[in-house]
Image (cartoon, helix red, strand yellow):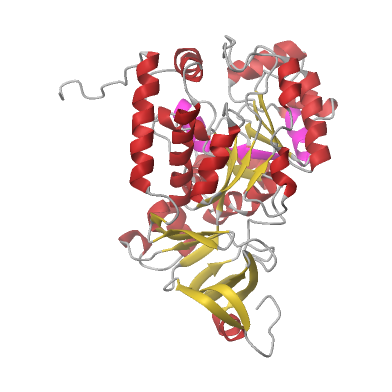
Amino acid sequence: MSGTRDAAPRPVDLLVTDAYLITMDTERRVFTHGAVAIAGGEIVAVGAARDVEPAVAPARRISADGAAVHPGFVECHNHTTLHTARGAFGDTISWNDVVPEFYVPYWNTVTDDEEYAGAALACLEMVRNGTTCFVEAGTAFEPEVVARAAAETGIRALVGDPFLWDIGGFTSDSPTVARAPYSTDRALGLLGGQLWRNDHPNALVRGHIAVVGMASASDELEIAAKAAADRAGVVLNQHQSYCEVDAADDDARLGRHPLRHLNEIGVLGPNCVFAHMNVLREDEVEPVLRSGMAISWNAPASMMWGVGGATGGRHAELYLAGAPVGLGSDSSNWANSFDIGRAATLAVLAARDGRCNRSMLSAEDGLTMATVNGARAVGLADRIGSLEVGKRADLVIRSDRLPEAHPVTDPIAAMLYASGSKSVDTVIIDGRVVLQGGDPVLVDAETVYRRVDRAAREVLGRMGYRTPRRWPHIA
């Protein structure tokens, strides 16, 4: 057992026992009959149940009934407020078209209440799928609505300032967003506006530095953002090299490949987490690895749009070379879900595509990216990502009461390849149960569904946008 065993049992708030305990600690220990004790939101004992149970006196006890228990998933890149857009456009629209034809009109009409509705659904969905922490990508006009939705659901969150960009880029045709015009003065004036949330050391909703990136940030903004992140001890998060279009924009503007340039001006570092990175050229690999920066591999979204989710990216190569590659869902992007377990599965399978190498990445690698690497990527490695004494108690209890979990041979492989998010039963964040029996504890799901359905109808209606009818012969 990790932790001190006193002569008299230690009072604790919660004991999770009878668990197939996957700690994801540095030794990757697994206890087939394990237990975790929690007090004050912190893990105070973890190990074999025969050692932990006699040492504690729990106020509450939860049995995992022999099912897997593991650290909560970390979502490294999430456009939380865009969740009202799921299902709004079909398979045939291209990435180059969807930004000017859908997203820019959406951003130019969406209200704070509608952003809140999308964020509330996103937070509920993430918790239901075993995610306990997420990074909002800096595209919420009102970050407070994301913070409010996260606090109500009980999920851990990092929020950023809204739409920090100052040059045309992002796509080959620069979008015009009325509430967030390209402006260096505007971006620098807002920079760091969410960092006050970090004043409390154990705050669940925290601030970070986010710029939009993806060929939309000047050197002045990039350097200022990195300096702000360094001063505050937080991560710098941005989109980067999503597809050939924005990579070409960066190439033309900078006269060299963007990761080389960002490294040479001092922007890359261990506290950077860049999302996507689908288009990475040979001369960019070494600076990325040497900098210690993290990458959010958003395999589901990239595969949905056909922009590097399979053989086109270098994510598996970077991961195997030691880069802290985490996982992200990006946005709802038609039929995507905020499901890091699914993202882990797709990342592992994408790494094999076209390489005839089944062992390139394993289920354990997927779980590593979803937990400890994710925590490292978002700057919280000392707090979450593994089940160890002294870390905050963010964990997921699975259920074996479904056919995909049997026969019980390899619970980690079964979780990633078979049962997926269906097996998530109970989620604990900072020592508090926020999901039990697959149902949210702190919010009413039906209220969230009604609110987001209404918000989607209203915002799409104002846009004059009609969702595609997939089966025209059905009335």
> Residue 369, relative to residue 181: is it above or below?
below
Residue 285 in percent (x, y) is at: 73, 33
Residue 270 in percent (x, y) is at: 77, 42
Residue at the image position 38 percent from the left and 55 percent from the top: 439
Question: Any magenta on residue 218?
Answer: no
In depth, the one of 160 and 24 nearer the eye is 160
Residue at the image position 84 percent from the left and 29 percent from the top: 266
Toward which corner of the image does residue 290 lie, by quadrant? top right
Q: Is residue 256 visible?
A: yes
* Total numbered labels placed on residues in the image: 0
Residue 340 in percent (x, y) is at: 51, 46
Question: Any magenta on residue 285?
Answer: yes
Q: Is residue 87 visible?
A: no
Q: Horizontally, is 167 left or right of 452 in the view?
A: right
In depth, the one of 341 and 387 nearer the eye is 387
Q: Horizontally, is 52 left or right of 304 in the view?
A: right
Tell me the magenta residue range.
Answer: 283-305
Quadrant into which the N terminus falls = bottom right
> Residue 226, relative to residue 385: is it above or below?
above
Residue 7 in percent (x, y) is at: 68, 90
The secondary structure that dominates the magenta segment is helix
Residue sitting farthest toward the bottom? 7
Residue at the image position 57 percent from the left and 26 percent from the top: 141
Quadrant into which the C terminus falls = top left
Q: Horizontally, is 93 left or right of 289 in the view?
A: left
In depth, the one of 356 and 98 nearer the eye is 98
> Residue 256, relative to residue 28: is it above or below?
above
